[in-house]
């Protein structure tokens, strides 16, 4: 019997459907990344957020944000999961940690998608 290679988490499956239904092309790209097997998904450390972000930017991390590094900019980070240290450091810098499913209800505005896979597909 073959092992499933796509998402098996019901919450993640629901999120992928919501992102696909959206008319925003960035959201469709995020859904494509989230469909990949877990071994193909990449975590993003805080030092990558610090490097990529400007103040008051929306940053989308399709998988998980880890707490390695420091962040000094107040940014809104949308992600499927956050480590506890990452949440603490983002909030201490004046930013917000938001679940990825809240992104569907947001106006896209200026966003940065942090994922090596998104960069390779463009």
Image (tube, helix red, strand yellow):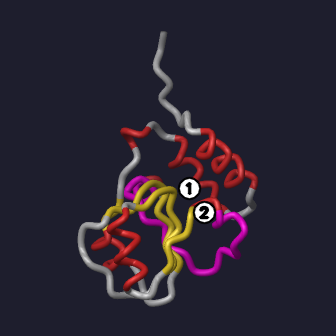
Q: Describe the element under mark 2 as helix, strand or loop.
A: helix
The image shows residue 89, relative to residue 33, as above or below, that is below
Residue that lies at the very extreme toward the top in this rendered image: 1
Number of residues whose C-alpha sits closer than 10 Å to that of mark 2, classed few (under 14), some (14–19) or many (20 or more): some
**122 part of magenta stretch:** no
Q: Which mark is residue 41?
A: none
Segment tinted magenta in the rendering = 102-120
Give me the residue at 36% from left, 51% from top.
42
What secondary structure is marked by label 1?
A: helix
Numbered mark located on residue 26 in the image: 2
Mark 1: give few (<14), some (14-19) or many (20+) Cα within 10 Å.
many
* Residue at mark 1: 30
**Was residue 114 drawn as part of the magenta stretch in this picture?**
yes
Q: Position of residue 75 (x, y in %)?
A: 47, 82
Q: Residue at x 75, y 61 (%)?
A: 23
> Which is more toward the observer, 28 or 49?
49
Tell which of 117 and 105 is nearer to you: 105
Image position of 111 (left or right of 43)? right
Most extreme residue toward the left, as rendered?
69
Is residue 33 found left or right of 68 in the rendered image?
A: right
Whole-number angstrom distance, CA of label 2 to CA of label 1: 6 Å
Report the residue at 38% width, 86% height from top: 93
């Amino acid at each position: 019997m073959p092992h499933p290679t796509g998402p098996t988490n019901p919450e993640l499956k629901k999120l992928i459907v919501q992102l696909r239904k959206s008319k925003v092309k960035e959201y469709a790209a995020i859904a494509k990344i989230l469909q990949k097997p877990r071994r193909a998904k990449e975590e993003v450390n805080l030092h990558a957020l610090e490097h990529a972000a400007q103040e008051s930017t929306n940053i989308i991390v399709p998988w998980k944000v880890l707490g390695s590094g420091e962040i000094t900019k107040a940014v809104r980070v949308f992600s499927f999961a956050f480590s506890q240290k990452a949440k603490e450091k983002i909030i201490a810098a004046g930013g917000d940690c938001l679940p990825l499913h809240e992104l569907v209800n947001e106006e896209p505005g200026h966003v940065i998608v942090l994922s090596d896979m998104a960069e390779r597909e463009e």
